[in-house]
Amino acid sequence: MNKVQENISIKQYNTFAISTVAKYFAEFNTADELSKLLEFKQPQTPNLPTGQAGHKPQTLILGGGSNILFTKDYYGLVLKNEIKGIKEIKEDEHHVYVQVGAGENWHQFVLHCIKKGWAGVENLSLIPGNVGASPMQNIGAYGVEIKEVFYSLEAYHIKDKRIINFSLNDCEFGYRESVFKRKYKDQFVITDVTYRLNKIPNYNISYGAIEQELEKMGVKDLSLQAVSHAVINIRSSKLPNPAEIGNAGSFFKNPEIGSHEFHELKRMFSGIVGYNLPNGNVKLAAGWLIEQAGWKGYRKGDAGCHEKQALVLVNYGNAKGSEILELSENILQSVQKKFGVSLEREVNIV
């Protein structure tokens, strides 16, 4: 088992590249290792910063670090999920069921599926982060969400010290939501996810600019590789690479409002972007709202709003997490004042 280290920089473990320190840090490769590490007794930390008095030992489970913003040093135990492995567990006439370790890189898993001819996740190419995060927040892009290919997952219950299986219904998936973000927040650690992938592709290219990109690429016959390449091209043209500019992808969720409210806004802002939902509501494009409020390309120090996609907040080098958080708060207030619409952060604040 990997031993617990002290005072470790976790800049390389978060895609915002925020320079912050974990008081205690360890990696785990199996559920058994996780169980043992969770028993680690954190010594009382003397000389804590102001506001940390009476500090209770805390534990943070870290995956790919792609949906988290550290605003201060972490005076607790950070456990990095490194559970790996991809295996076919069964198949039927139409599907193959693939169990994947939560510590596997998501995009590498997508490429593996494409190579194997397993369909269903090609539209989710180049999404940063690890497999364990995919059901936690029901990741989605270009007309596809994880719930469409999800079969089950196993998660370690921290208090009961046992593995529990979750079905599709158990996860209660919503828009960037699951039981692990609300009802069971901080109670479970996802160890592996099983996906039900299609043997025969059912291509989804009507969303966004996929069709136009395929045409530009000169694609005559659709394939999983072609759709994946189109998505990668689109994402690369609009979104900054975390390896080059620190970011966590979309910082805000696209807000949902009633149809009457949307028509009122449409009357005042004719260019407003909205998508009709099955429940009668309308989903607004948060990026459009933020851009119209004047934030696209904004920069103060090393904290900024990306020049090509207003939905993405970035660290140009040495921004503090607190500076990114302050910028997000200013954006929230600005959009609320201009449009009367409340944005919600998608990124977890620590």
Image (spheres, helix red, strand yellow):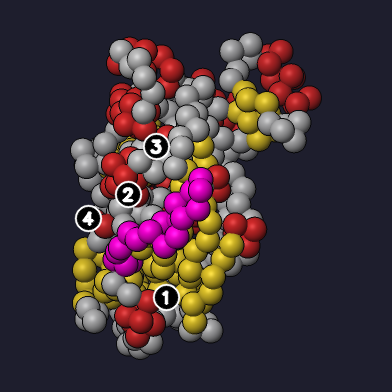
User: Which residue occupies the foreground of this view, 11 or 231?
Assistant: 231
> Given the image, on which type of amino acid does mark 4 rest?
Gln
User: Which residue occupies the foreground of this view, 146 or 299?
Assistant: 146
Relative height, residue 209 to residue 190 (above, below): above
Q: Position of residue 51 (x, y in %)?
A: 43, 70
Q: Earlier in the sequence, mark 1 or mark 2?
A: 1
Magenta residues span: 80-98
Relative height, residue 231 to residue 153 (above, below): above
C-alpha gap between disc 3 and disc 2: 10 Å
Q: Which residue is mark 3?
A: 122
Q: Which residue is mark 4?
A: 12
> Given the image, on which type of amino acid does mark 3 rest?
Glu
180 lies left or right of 100: right
Q: In which quadrant will I find the N terminus? A: bottom left
Q: Position of residue 282 (x, y in %)?
A: 68, 29
C-alpha gap between disc 4 and disc 2: 21 Å
Asked if the residues shown at circle 4 and circle 2 are in contact, with their CB atoms under 8 angstroms apart, the answer is no
Q: Which residue is mark 2?
A: 109
Residue 58 - label: 1
Residue 106 - label: none
C-alpha gap between disc 3 and disc 4: 27 Å
